[in-house]
C-alpha cells in the first residue's frame, strides 16, 4: 500500500512494508525519477517536475518507508507522476540507468579525490613533523657545537698558562747552581774519647732468685781520657 500527499514545498510518499527489512533497500532519487526497490516491493515513478535530489531523503521505519521529495519550485502540482507507455517506460529506464551509472562514477571519483586529498594532507603533515624534528635536532647539534667552541678556548688558555708555568718552574728547578767551596782539609786532628765505668745489669725474671740491681751511677772522677791519634786522608 502506497500513500502520497503533497504540500507547496514537498511531496511525501509512504510505502507500507509487509515484513522486516533485513538489508539496505535500493533507492534512487533523480531530478525527475524515483525508485524504491526492496523485494518483493518495487516502486518506480517518473515525476512531472523536478525535485531537489540533494535535499530529498528517505527514512525506513519498522512497518513503513517514508520518502520526502523537496520541490525545486514551490506550489501544488496538478499531476505528480507521468503516464508512460511500455515503450516509453523502457526507454526511460535505459536513460535512467545511464544517468545512475554516470552519477555513481562521479560519486566514486569524488570519493577517490577526497581520499587522495586526505591522504596527501596526512603525508604533508607527516613530512612537516619529520622536517621540524630534524630541524630541532640540527639546531640542538649546532648549539652544542657552539657551546663546545665557546668553552674550549678558555680551557686551552688555562692549560697553556699552566703548561707555561710548569715549563718555567721546570726551567728554574733545572738551572745549575754553583757549588759551594768545600772547607780546607785538616792535616792533623785530635779526638778525645772518654769512657766511664758505668755498669747496669738487666733485671732478672720473676722466676729467678734475687732482685734487680738498682741503677748505679759511678763517680765521674774515675772517668779516663784516651787519646786516639788520627791521620789525615
Image: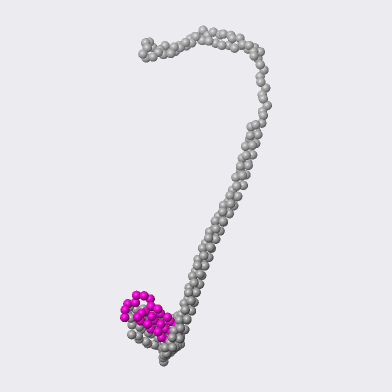
Residue found at the far bottom of this picture:
78
State which region is magenta. Answer: 18-47
At 64% from the left edge and 13% from the top edge, which residue is drawn?
232
Q: Is residue 96 above or below residue 206?
A: below
Whether residue 33 sits left or right of residue 158 in the image: it is left
Residue 180 visible somewhere in the drawing? yes
Residue 187 is situated, as x and y percent measured from the top left of the image, at 66, 13
At 64% from the left edge and 37% from the top edge, which residue is drawn?
167
Q: Is residue 133 above or below residue 5?
A: above
Q: Is residue 34 magenta?
A: yes
At 35% from the left edge and 86% from the top edge, which residue is drawn?
3
Residue 208 is situated, as x and y percent measured from the top left of the image, at 37, 12
Residue 32 visible somewhere in the drawing? no
Residue 190 is situated, as x and y percent measured from the top left of the image, at 61, 11
- In the foreground, 68 or 180: 68
Which quadrant is home to the N terminus? bottom left
Residue found at the far front of this picture:
87
At 47% from the left edge and 81% from the top edge, which residue is drawn?
98
- In the foreground, 25 or 129: 25
Q: Is residue 126 above or below residue 150?
A: below
Coloring scheme used: one colour
Which quadrant is home to the C terminus? top right
Q: How many marks?
A: 0
- In the foreground, 130 or 27: 27
Whether residue 30 sits left or right of residue 189 in the image: it is left
Residue 89 is situated, as x and y percent measured from the top left of the image, at 43, 87
Amino acid at each position: 500500500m502506497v500513500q502520497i500527499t503533497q504540500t507547496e514545498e514537498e511531496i511525501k510518499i509512504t510505502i507500507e512494508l509487509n515484513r522486516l527489512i533485513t538489508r539496505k533497500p535500493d533507492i534512487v532519487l533523480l531530478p525527475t525519477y524515483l525508485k524504491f526497490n526492496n523485494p518483493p516491493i518495487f516502486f518506480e515513478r517518473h515525476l512531472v517536475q523536478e525535485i531537489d535530489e540533494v535535499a530529498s531523503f528517505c527514512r525506513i521505519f519498522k512497518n513503513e518507508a517514508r520518502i520526502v521529495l523537496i520541490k525545486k519550485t514551490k506550489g501544488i502540482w496538478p499531476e505528480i507522476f507521468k503516464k508512460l507507455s511500455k515503450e516509453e517506460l523502457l526507454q526511460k529506464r535505459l536513460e535512467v540507468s545511464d544517468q545512475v551509472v554516470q552519477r555513481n562514477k562521479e560519486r566514486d571519483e569524488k570519493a577517490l579525490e577526497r581520499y587522495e586529498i586526505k591522504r596527501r594532507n596526512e603525508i604533508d603533515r607527516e613530512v612537516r613533523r619529520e622536517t621540524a624534528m630534524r630541524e630541532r635536532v640540527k639546531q640542538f647539534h649546532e648549539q652544542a657545537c657552539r657551546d663546545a667552541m665557546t668553552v674550549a678556548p678558555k680551557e686551552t688558555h688555562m692549560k697553556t698558562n699552566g703548561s707555561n708555568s710548569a715549563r718555567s718552574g721546570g726551567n728554574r728547578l733545572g738551572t745549575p747552581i754553583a757549588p759551594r767551596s768545600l772547607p780546607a782539609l785538616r792535616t792533623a786532628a785530635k779526638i778525645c774519647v772518654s769512657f766511664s765505668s758505668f755498669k747496669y745489669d738487666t733485671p732478672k725474671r720473676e722466676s729467678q732468685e734475687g732482685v734487680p740491681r738498682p741503677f748505679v751511677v759511678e763517680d765521674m772522677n774515675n772517668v779516663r781520657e784516651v787519646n786516639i791519634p788520627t791521620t789525615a786522608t
